[in-house]
Image: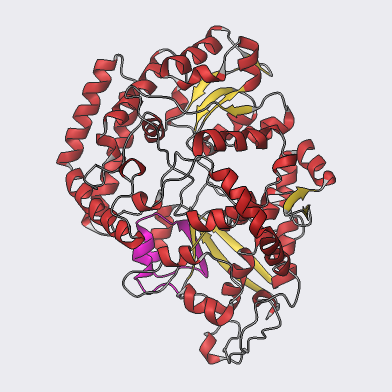
Amino acid sequence: MKKLNRNSRANGKNIMKRAGAIALAAFLALTMLPGCGAKTDKESLQQTEGSSPEETDFVYDPDKASWQQDTSPLELEWFVAYDWADLSFDPENNKFDEYVYTNTGITIKFTIGSQEKLNVLMATESLPDLVTYDAASMERVSLEESGQLLPLDELKEKYAPDMQVPQAQIDWYTNAKDGHWYSLVGYFYDLEDTYARGGYIETHNMNFARKDIMEDLGIDPASMNTKEGFIAALQKVKDANVTYNGQTVIPYIGDEVEFLAEQFGMDRESKEGELLNAKRQPEFLEALLFLNEIYAKGLTTDEIFTMDTTLRRQLVSSGSVFAGTRHNYLNGKDTLFYADPDALMIGTGLITGDSGKEAYISPSPTGGWAATMITSNCKNPQRAAALLSFMTQPEISLSYYYGGIDGYDIIDGKAIIKPEREAERTADTTAFNAKYRSTVQDLVCDYVWVNAYEPTETLDAMGLDKVAYTEKWVNGHIFDGKIFTDVAPEAGSDLAAISAQLNAYWGQQFPMIVMAKTPEEATQLYNDTIAQMDIMGMADLDAYQNERFQENKKKMGLDFAWPRNQ
């Protein structure tokens, strides 16, 4: 992997200028109008509702988009293994759902559940038409090899040649044993493809703080780039007893030990090219002690150990949080900003650790986030493949971020939200989202389209802050995360059981370490925890994950994957 140039965003802009006409033409050619499907030779492909493709008389019309080959009413069942997800299908009240139904004839019956529920469906071979869950989960490969899925590469070739998926994604997620591709993964980033399309790489490893409160208390954001300065800023907020809309502001929320360890200079590959277990690294302990100090000084809340996504969002969106770590941990800061532009949470930059080493941080997962698959139980594979093709078109991703369907214009290669939609979003973000957006767009999003068409010149203060942060703190400071994270043992294996036990045990020990009364006690608890995890089999898991890591490097043609080693 080539080390990213610090001027990569500028390079991306240059690439976009060179490729802008091509990208824009491709986008316009792939709008959701009849007749925009990719040109292919006609194939005698069999399909009727409720039966397998081979048993019927479906013939592909190359003059129509795949999702308009058949628009007769059809309901597909879709299980999403994120129990926090807010998903329903309501074409009468949601403009995106109406758009899906109008163009495809498909209605979706969403079922939301946990990973455990998915495991039950897998074990009983009762999966619905489509399933979505973490691409990096241990169940993905096991399910691919269980015979309970249909190969997307074959479905794409037969029924959905206009499906827009980077070849790098297909290559990365091709099953090593049978050579088939099964997983459509949202938010996948291939570095070469991203820059070629004029996009750029982002990260969730960011520290944020309220700009208005910093200004009121005379806190310089740059002072928060040291551990001492960061804690001093939190202490100022506590001492000033800052309130917002009648609520006392919590100085800090966050429990991201690995992200803080990365900021402090943690390495993930040894100089010999072996995968390093993050929990064993000195910067990991340093991050735990940093959180221990924040807790001991009363700069956070006990609820960090128990709060769910909904509570965090409520706290952030209501203005009750001054600072935090992790971009998506602080969901709700956009709602706060639209309600009160002065209450902007800005990126304050990375925190330098004791070693002073340059930080290399995790990008938004380059391997992507949610994997969507079509199961062998699917009542109509042709229509399911066409639906996924529909979901991969740029319009689906762009509309999620730029004002909804028909809510933006493409002007000089940029997506510009229409003024009336921007006014709606600003007036009531919750109502706007309910009317124009769907979580399913987020699950399948190709975010490269979003930042390739980003209207930098017209961004609001929140958007401009993100761009400035990316240029200063992200470009040149990231690594290709999928090489390091796609190392989980197969579901059902002994090592998978060990991994689950280790995760549960760490979840039990982590609060105790952070809440320890002294740094010495926290350190002893950490050392005892690592020793116990080794007794539980962590060393065996380390060895297995290193084997997978070496395979990943070989797949990518790399001797070393860590920027400091290249």
Residue 340 point in image, percent of width and height: 73, 27
Residue 405 point in image, percent of width and height: 75, 57
Residue at 49 percent of width and 67 percent of height: 167
| The image quarter in which residue 92 lies | bottom right
Left or right of 28? Residue 331 is: left
- Near-viewer residue (94 or 328): 328
Magenta residues (range): 122-150
Which residue in the rendered view is the most extreme toward the right?
A: 420
- Near-viewer residue (53 or 165): 165
Tell whether position 144 is magenta: yes
Residue 276 point in image, percent of width and height: 26, 42
Which residue in the rendered view is the most extreme toward the left?
A: 535
**According to the image, what is the colour scheme of the structure?**
secondary structure
Residue 497 point in image, percent of width and height: 25, 52
Left or right of 273? Residue 99 is: right
- Near-viewer residue (485 or 110): 485
Q: Is residue 89 visible?
A: no
Q: Is residue 457 above or below residue 375?
A: above
Q: Is residue 295 above or below residue 5?
A: above
Left or right of 272? Residue 439 is: right
Q: Is residue 322 above or below residue 475?
A: above
